[in-house]
Each structure stands twice: as C-alpha cells, then as structure tokens.
Image (tube, rainbow, N blue to C red):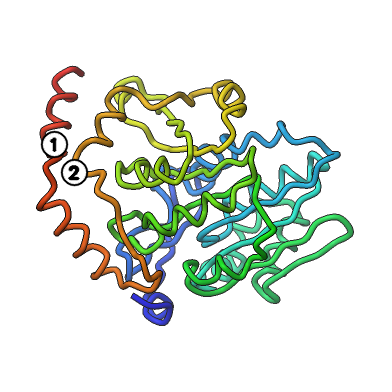
Amino acid sequence: MNSDEVIRGNLSLYRTDDGSISLRSSIFHEGFHCTSGALKEAREKFLLPAELDQFTSEKKINVLDVCFGMGYNTACIVEKLIRNSIEFNWWGLEVDRRPVKIGLENLNYRSLWDLEVCQILSSLNDKGYWKNKTNKGQILWGDARQTLSVIPKNITFNLILLDAFSPVKCPMLWTEEFLYKLASKLAPEGRLITYCTAAAIRKSMRKSGLTLFSRMPIDNRQRRWSNGTIGILDKNEIKQIKHISGWTSLTPMEEEHLLTKASVPYRDPSGLSSKTTILGLRQKEQATSEMESTSNWKRRWEQTE
C-alpha cells in the first residue's frame, strides 16, 4: 500500500462517546480513535505517560509524533508544554494531509484547544511548519519509513508518540526495522509511547534495546489485559516511570505472551515492502515456528481469571 492509495481512501466523520470527533478510514477499515473518546484516548494513552511535569523550563525538549493524524496527541502535548513554559522543538510524520484539515473545519474540534494551539495546527495544515520566539515545529508529509530519515541525525527525542493504525491493518509502521529506527532516535532519557500492546511489537521494541512498561486498565475485570506500552532506554528512568499511576513492569502473563507465535515480528528489510508482503512473510514464519500457539496461552490465562 503506497501513499497514493492511502490518500484515495475515504474518511468518514463520527462522534466518540466523550463528544470529540474522529475519523474512520475506508482503506484501513479502522477508526483513528476508540469509540470511548478521541480526546480521552489522547490524554490517557499519550499525555499522561509523557509526564510533562518532569521537564523544567530550563531545558528545551524534542517531540516526535509518528502518525500525526488529526493532531489530538500533539495538541494535548503542545498545549501543556506551553502552559508549563517549557521550550520545545516538534516534528511530525504523516502520509495524509486531510485528517487535520477536516478537524480544523469542525467547530467541535477547534473548541477543544487554546487559540495558540489552534494557530499551530492551522499553520501545520497550511504551511507544514510553525515557529515563534521559543518553539518551532515541522511536519514531514509522506511515508514515515522514508521521512524519518529526513530528520537530522544529531536530533534525538525526549518523547516519541507512535499512533499508527493497528499492526494487522498497517504493518508497515510496526516492523522490527522501523521500531529499531525509532528507538535509535530516542534521547538517553527519552520515552517511546504507544497504545499498542501486541506481542510482536513489544518483542521488537525490547530487541531494539528498550525496557518496557505496561499500562493497566482501571477496570478490575480486565486487570490482566494491558492497553498501552512505554519503552525507555535509560535504566535510571525506571523509578520515574513507576511513579505514574497505572504503569508497571510487564506482568507474567504479558511476558509469556512474548514467547508465543504472536511475538513473531513484522519484517521489512527494504523499508519499501507492501502490507501484503509484510503480512505474508509473517504468516509463513508463524506457520513454521515452534513457539506456543497464542490461543493456548490465552486459554491458560483466561482460566485463572
């Protein structure tokens, strides 16, 4: 699937349960956000684990938003950085120019953000960048596998937000190779934050040198099933991460998940492979793998609930 195919797909608008709007892609057959709330998801799965209060006004930070989409994650992060008077440089990667434009044309969406944040989003939509006295940002349009390399090699990030469509729908941005490249762009104390908890993704993140943390849901009935992942490089950050409410080291169940066939990675050595090719290679590897089946793992742990 190339950039032109993505842009030709239809985007349909819908309202989520918290009142904020989102989009559904006809190409990926998936919504941009969960139905419980687009704004709620951005705050809980990206803003909260970013823990922006850890940064001081004396230190300028770098932020990378992979799959900018409608801009919810960036808007939440930028809004708080501005309020806390923290200077920052921002980069975004996105293949489709339409989502943020659709959002900005909707009064419901614009009403969520401060005027300055709306102006930043508008500038990104119109010009692809923004700049003021202290902060600046630039969005790189195109396939993130290629545009990531446009970012100067000397720039590393305190925060990387990875919010692509799910791995089965968009495996191109969840491959072992792409995740390794993202991990290599982390500053020593940086955090790679994603909603994804798939075993293949976590195993690839760990293989790239990251220490993993898991977000436990508030609902005790689903207490074993995580709904978010943080990857860090600096072991000194572990104590800091553990202070975030609801975040913990991977549970025994999650660790065993990484030993099943579900952990077979998505591979794309060329950085140019299609969705069909990536999924086909993984299916072949899973078929010949001697690891435990994921269904057996799931049954074992469901019996302990």
- Place of residue 271 in the rendered image (x, y in percent of width and height, measured from the top left): 40, 69
- Place of residue 65 in the rendered image (x, y in percent of width and height, measured from the top left): 58, 56
The residue shown at (39%, 45%) is 196
Question: How many marks can you see?
Answer: 2
Q: Is residue 129 above or below residue 232?
A: below
Q: Residue furthest right?
A: 133
The answer to whether 300 appears left or right of 137 in the picture is left
The answer to whether 251 appears left or right of 3 in the picture is left
Q: Which residue bears the numbered disc 1? A: 292
Evaluate if marks 1 and 2 touch, with contact meaning CB atoms under 8 Å apart: yes
- Secondary structure at badge 1 equals loop
The answer to whether 124 appears left or right of 42 in the picture is right
Q: Is residue 286 above or below residue 48?
A: below
The residue shown at (37%, 24%) is 219
Residue 91 sits in quarter: bottom right
Q: Amino acid at mark 1?
A: Glu
The circle on residue 261 is: 2
